Image (tube, grey):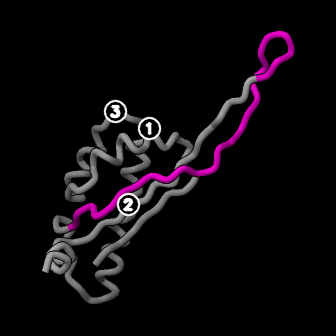
Amino acid sequence: MEAKAQARYVRVTPQKARRVVNEIRGKSAVEALELLTFAPQGVARDVKKILESAIANARFVSERDGERFNEEDLNIVATYVDEGPTMKRIRPRAQGRANRILKRTSHITVIVGDNADDAQKGA
């Protein structure tokens, strides 16, 4: 059983978000939550909310299908950060010139699955 959560148009650059997402890839969901709680990066709070949402989605799917649910069994199957649209702003400069400021956005996705999925894929 897999569950997915996604946040779109998060106002952080994809490069900064990937630093945090790469740290939790492949870990258990509980371990990743603990790691994100104490991570100093600002985007860690957003990634933590997405991970909590993915865990809640997994709980909903398992209850809907009548399966047993244990949060300890969940692993992070995949996490990735895609680039969203870039907002373009103008900053006045000297002698009537203007510089462009790029305010980047990210689409962050977290997919969690249980250990039974890993065993079935390996077999």
Q: Are marks 1 and 3 in contact (CB under 8 Å)?
A: no
Q: Find the distance from the CA under tag 1 to the CA under tag 3.
A: 12 Å
Q: Find the distance from the CA under tag 2 to the CA under tag 3.
A: 20 Å
Q: Amino acid at mark 3?
A: Pro
Left or right side of 87 for 19? left
Q: Find the distance from the CA under tag 2 to the CA under tag 1.
A: 16 Å
Name the residue tied to disc 3: 40
> Which mark is on residue 16?
1
Q: Is residue 80 magenta?
A: yes
Q: Which residue is at the far right?
A: 96
Report the number of discs. 3
Q: Upstream in the sequence, badge 1 or badge 3?
A: 1
Tell me what residue is drawn at x 63 percent, y 37 percent: 103
Name the residue tied to disc 2: 110
Tell me what residue is drawn at x 35 percent, y 77 percent: 60
Q: Amino acid at mark 1?
A: Lys
